[in-house]
Every structure is written in C-alpha cells, then in structure tokens.
Image: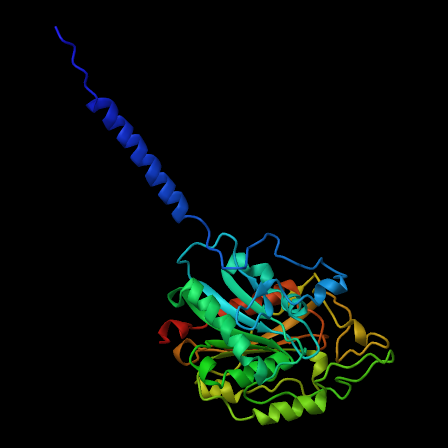
C-alpha cells in the first residue's frame, strides 16, 4: 500500500507560528517609543546639572539639537517612553537677557517633571544672549518642527514660559500672527505681569562690587519695555505670573488683575503655601560680591504663596505666585516648580489642534 504524505498539518502549524511571530514583531514595533529627529532621548536628561555647583561650561551650553534652517541649536526634552500618538503639553521656555538656554532649563527645571506630566520642552538659546525680532523665525521653526513631528492633534496645550526679558519676549511674540492663534498660556517668571505690574525694589539690577557686567535689563529698561507692551494682547490665553518677594517694592503684588477681569474670573483666592526643603539648581554668580537680595542670593530652601482667580471664562487660568524672601535669579525649587506645572495643566488648551 502506498504511504501518503500529508503536509497540511505541519504547514498549517508552521503558518500559525510564523503569523504569530509577525504579529508580535509588528506589535513590538508599534510600541517603540517616539523619538524626535536629531534629538535622542536620555535618562537622566543630557547636560543636567547636579543639585548644586553646576559647572560653568554646562550652564552656558546652547543645546545639542539643531534647528535645521538656521543651524542654531536648542534643547528638546521629552519622555523617553513617549508613545506614538500620546497627548502631550508643549512648552517653549525662553531664558532672560544675559543668560543661556541651559541656565533657563535649570532656573525653571520642568525637565525634572517631563515624565510625570508628559511634557515636551523646547529651550532655545540666543547667541546675543538677548531676544529680539531677529530670533522670531528661529523660534517659529522650532515650534513647527515639534508640531510637524508629533502631530498637532497630539498637543493638548502649548505654553510660552519666559524669565525676565524672556518673559517680555513672550509678551511680544504672543501678539504676533504666528503665536497668537497657537498659544494656550503664558507663564511669566519675573517677566512682566498682565493686568498691572508690581513696583520694583530700588536695588533691583544694581552692579556688584566685582564690576561684573550687569544683565542688560535693569529696572529702567525693564519699565520701558513693559510700558511698550502695556496694552493687553488681543488673543485670549491663560496667564500665570511668578516673582520673588525681594524683587518688588513694599507694596508687593497687586491684589487685583485686569487680565483676570477680562477673563471674567472670581475674586483672588489664596491657596495653601508651598514649602520647599530643597534649593534650586542655579543662581547669578556675578552678583554675589556684595550680595544683592533683590537680584538674587545663593539657592536655598523656600516658601511660596499661591493666589488664583477662580472660575474664569472658558477654562482659563489666571494666577499669581510670590516666592518669599527670593530675588530675581535664584533657581526655582522643586515643589513650586511642580505646582506651576499643575496650574498650567489645569487650564484649557487645544489651540494648535485648531490651526490650519
């Protein structure tokens, strides 16, 4: 009797195995973390400062990521386990005059919270150390690159953050055609307050005995720049103002806000103080001989008062934050940094998703 050879069984099993392997490979590939072009993710983040005494060459680093049109560099931090299509909050963080991108990255160290709160943070660098309209295209190109790669549908909110002259630059660019329809919020770190500025301490910006060159934005220059932007922007967005108590005169921060009134918020309400037992990362080493408290002393633990204007129109957030016994340049401590992130994330977003 002729013996028949039946390959159907083995081939079927082999097909099932190969199909399963292909499916697993496809699943694994689909689960690979998202990575921005030219911006590999690292843990801990690249060029991160130690808890204190950050090396000078690290503080002044302009960043490893190239903006391809201008070839200028910047920092781009994001969760290393970011999934394709995962919603994120996008932040453009601008340093102050006389400063650097990596100093800003540690002055307001939201890079430490990028994983927990799913943040994408671009921190650019001005080669002249002062922002001007000549930098606008560079900043726009960074925003376009991030949005194009991650997809505008995946950006829950887009915030500007700026310290000092970086804050005033935020105030200027949020009025431009490119940014006014994209920005959901602005966090001003001692960079001007919408709805009435507090007065400046008389010693703000004074030169130290070492003769070190002062940061260009002194009190009169700051006042002049702020006056030029006194009229409120025409677009609607959330606004958070943070400042050091020693930067202000004895009157302190105003109890009312014209911006909050425009947003139809309720009367200002004080939240529980934020107490930090750990100091920030950076400070201005050129102003310590003699020390100038209004400009900023060495990093130290601290306490911050948080005021919110509740129940604003359409999910807008308006808030004031005062860091007690702090000046202009002590880096923010971890808990108050996280509280500011929480305030930002509590606001309504989605403008980028609605752009053409």
Instruction: Kindly identify the residue that appears in the image at 87 percent across and 80 percent down.
Output: 209
Q: Quadrant of residue 303?
A: bottom right
Can residue 308 be seen in the rendering of this structure?
no
Q: Nearer the viewer, residue 16 or 241?
A: 16
Q: Nearer the viewer, residue 340 or 8?
A: 8
Instruction: Kindly identify the residue that appears in the image at 62 percent across and 81 percent down.
Output: 131
Q: Which residue of the protein is positioned furthest toward the top in this rendering?
A: 1
Left or right: residue 264 compared with residue 165: left
Q: Quadrant of residue 110?
A: bottom right
Left or right: residue 19 compared with residue 151: left
At which x and y percent is residue 331? 69, 69
At which x and y percent is residue 167? 60, 80
Instruction: Kindly identify the residue that appears in the image at 31 percent across and 33 percent down.
Output: 18
Left or right: residue 113 compared with residue 352: right
At which x and y percent is residue 186? 52, 77
At which x and y percent is residue 286? 80, 74
Q: Nearer the viewer, residue 230 or 213?
A: 213
Colour basis: rainbow
Q: Quadrant of residue 287?
A: bottom right
């Amino acid at each position: 009797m002729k013996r028949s050879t039946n390959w159907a069984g083995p081939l079927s099993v082999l097909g099932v195995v190969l199909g399963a392997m292909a499916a697993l490979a496809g699943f694994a590939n689909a689960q690979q973390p998202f990575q921005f072009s030219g911006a590999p993710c690292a843990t801990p983040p690249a060029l991160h400062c130690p808890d204190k005494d950050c090396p000078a060459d690290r503080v002044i680093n302009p960043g490893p990521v190239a903006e391809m049109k201008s070839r200028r560099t910047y920092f781009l931090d994001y969760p290393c386990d970011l999934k394709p299509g995962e919603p994120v909050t996008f932040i453009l963080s601008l340093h102050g005059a006389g400063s650097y991108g990596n100093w800003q990255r540690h002055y307001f160290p939201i890079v430490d919270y990028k994983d927990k709160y799913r943040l994408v943070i671009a921190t650019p660098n001005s080669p002249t150390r002062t922002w001007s309209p000549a930098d606008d295209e560079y900043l726009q190109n960074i925003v376009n690159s991030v949005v194009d790669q991650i997809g505008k549908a995946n950006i829950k909110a887009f915030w500007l953050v700026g310290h000092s002259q970086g804050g005033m630059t935020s105030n200027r660019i949020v009025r431009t055609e490119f940014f006014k329809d994209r920005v959901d919020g602005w966090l001003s770190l001692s960079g001007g307050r919408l709805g009435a500025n507090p007065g400046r301490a008389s010693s703000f910006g004074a030169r130290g005995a070492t003769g070190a060159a002062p940061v260009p934005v002194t009190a009169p220059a700051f006042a002049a720049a702020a006056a030029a932007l006194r009229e409120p922007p025409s677009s609607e967005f959330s606004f958070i103002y943070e400042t050091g108590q020693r930067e202000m005169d004895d009157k302190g921060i105003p109890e009312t806000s014209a911006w909050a009134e425009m947003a139809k918020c309720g009367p200002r309400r004080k939240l529980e103080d934020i107490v930090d037992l750990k100091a920030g990362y950076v400070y201005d080493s050129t102003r310590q001989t003699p020390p100038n408290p209004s400009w900023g002393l060495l990093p130290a633990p601290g306490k911050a008062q948080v005021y919110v204007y509740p129940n604003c129109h359409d999910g807008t957030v308006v808030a004031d934050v005062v860091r007690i016994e702090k000046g202009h340049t002590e880096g923010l401590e971890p808990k108050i940094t996280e509280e500011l992130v929480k305030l930002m994330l509590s606001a309504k977003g989605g403008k980028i998703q609605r752009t053409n």
